[in-house]
Image (cartoon, coloured by chain):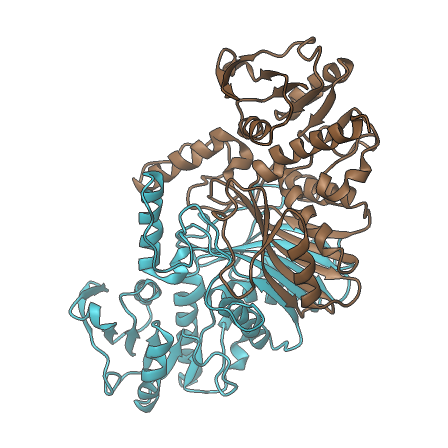
Chain colours: A cyan, B brown
Amino acid sequence: MNCAVVGATGAVGRELLGLLESRAFPVAMLRCFASPRSIGRKVPFAGRVIDVQALHEHAFDGCDFVFFDASDAVSKEFVPFAVRSGAWVIDNSSVYRLDPQVPLIVPDVNAAMWNNSRILAGPNCTTVQLVVFLAACAKVAPLKRVVVASYQSTSGAGLLAMDELRAGTVDFLESKPECRSFFPEPIAFNCIPQIGSFDAEGWTSEETKVMMETRKILGHEDLGLVATAVRVPTLHCHAQSVFLEYSHDFTMEQVHTTLADAPGIQLHATYACSRGQYAATGGDDVHVGRLRRDRSVPFGLAAWVVSDNLRRGAALNALHIAEMVCRGIAPS
Amino acid sequence: MNCAVVGATGAVGRELLGLLESRAFPVAMLRCFASPRSIGRKVPFAGRVIDVQALHEHAFDGCDFVFFDASDAVSKEFVPFAVRSGAWVIDNSSVYRLDPQVPLIVPDVNAAMWNNSRILAGPNCTTVQLVVFLAACAKVAPLKRVVVASYQSTSGAGLLAMDELRAGTVDFLESKPECRSFFPEPIAFNCIPQIGSFDAEGWTSEETKVMMETRKILGHEDLGLVATAVRVPTLHCHAQSVFLEYSHDFTMEQVHTTLADAPGIQLHATYACSRGQYAATGGDDVHVGRLRRDRSVPFGLAAWVVSDNLRRGAALNALHIAEMVCRGIAPS
């Protein structure tokens, strides 16, 4: 397959290049694109070195797959060219996610939603781990309502945001003033309850994404869902405190058995220390722990969910989509 | 008043000494006690220097007020001696909090619960800020259910735990292995979903404290309440994502007006960035922000609550209790 990666030098793009190689995706030709400041850089791939190019109208001619891991603005401008070139377009921006014509896909959960659209959208990284967990939970009983409070690492804001945390931490420890450009307050040793911009009712764009995308992926448009998204001073992985309500009764044994069997989920024992964000870094799994029967409602379940946001939440999901398309278009 | 502070060199004890002075509590004599490793140290108070002494049976003879800000074990052993000495005992350990004979007091919320008991318990620091917020919210309409996910700083585990975060952070940035003794995983750049020990159903002792103490303080024994308590890599202040359900309808305007008028609460505008943990450090207020109408249930409200756990959550509350007792025992 002839492939192109847009945003190849970014946090998700770099993760994707590693996965294309390690999962042996059949890459015949690879083109790497990035923002103007990265033009001329070289990225390693499968023992070769690939020049980073500038985007243009015909950048994708001859491509089978184009992966967009850049900004909304870049997707808005260049996805149409990728479609015109005849490629399958896997877009990780938020531009197409809620477009009713475009399937929003987490292949482990809703591969059946793919309607042969040439554009396939990947959700927000926070959404991926949540829907993998919720889809498994929904095998036990129908979901009624979900409450999510997130603990999101700086990597979700990109490589430079991670640098800002590292530099800000050193500055803080040396009692120097912290520079900041990625976060509304200094992020070192702080938790900031704002990711994205506010709407008229006070929700952030990150919270709205999680709520809307989760409903679309689960095909459950009236699912009660509320989220508070919080940036925490960590480098890797997003974590979530999840409180869900079933619409009828269940047993903890059913939950344990179902989650233990769910693909892509690593279940941690309730009575051991459940894992923090270190556990999931660099891995493919959604880690689930702290499972408890929540008796504050008739059929409640509390849990802790953690996953590598760049890898499981973005790059691996995009590649799962490409692998799904490959299977779908292969002569049977 | 003749006063004694047990745990005077600890995180809360130091804060309390500062408050006794800055709030001009009428201290005639002050004795400071601490664990054996601190004996012989000197602590500053009101321009004087006070020797830290070892605890013994008659340590509190002649005292009017004894503040316990040490471990459960120390309170268990020495509170009875303080009571026998005739002092008012303000205990911040968890030993007496759920004792039906002992009032558990946050004076802003439930001063009326004081029954002239000689022992008065102060709640867990996480509970204090939650009940101050919930008691104000309950003026709008009766509460039905509360969901809390916490973001708790290392200061809740003491001064040495804060040192472990600082040292672990430096080690992490220099790629050295992290030493750890206070937390179940390394805390630098990590969020750990475990504070305290696990019970048979998988709840941590911290979560159980918040749930039980909040019900007792609010006098609302059947309040639906569920909490996940998480340690985050910050130094000061605890934050909480709170999702509450009212038992009947309300308006956001009622909530804003009521919280803006509530003593001890600093309300932040919905549309500005609500504050992270820096905002509350060293202050007396419970900061409330990110107020939103939660439409995932009929009468839902989402909020972000943050407060200085050592000061508002422990030392200031203990002093508020002492001030309440002073008013109560003063000749009228």
Outermost residue to the bottom = A84
Q: Residue at x 35, y 45 (%)?
A: A169
Q: Is the residue A97 above or below the residue B77 in the image?
A: below
Q: Is the residue B46 above or below the residue A292 in the image?
A: above
Percent coordinates x, y for residue B289 in the rendering: 57, 58
Percent coordinates x, y for residue A52 in the rendering: 20, 71
Q: Is residue B96 visible?
A: no
Q: Which residue is drawn at 49% across and 81% down?
A: A103
Q: Between B24 and B278, which is closer to the camera in this rendering?
A: B24
Percent coordinates x, y for residue B281 in the rendering: 50, 42
| Quadrant the N terminus of chain A occupies | bottom left
Q: Is the residue B239 above or below the residue B83 in the image?
A: below
Q: Between A42 and A73, which is closer to the camera in this rendering?
A: A73
Q: Residue at x 70, y 15 (%)?
A: B63
Percent coordinates x, y for residue B200 in the rendering: 70, 40
Q: Can residue A31 be seen in this view?
A: yes
Q: How many labels does the image show?
A: 0
Could you say which quadrant of the image residue B82 lies in?
top right
Q: Between A296 and A256, which is closer to the camera in this rendering?
A: A296
Task: Name the side, left or right, on which B120 lies relative to A183.
Answer: right
Q: Residue at x 42, y 42 (%)?
A: B188
Could you say which quadrant of the image residue A120 lies in?
bottom left
Q: Between A123 and B76, which is closer to the camera in this rendering?
A: B76
| Quadrant the C terminus of chain A occupies | bottom left
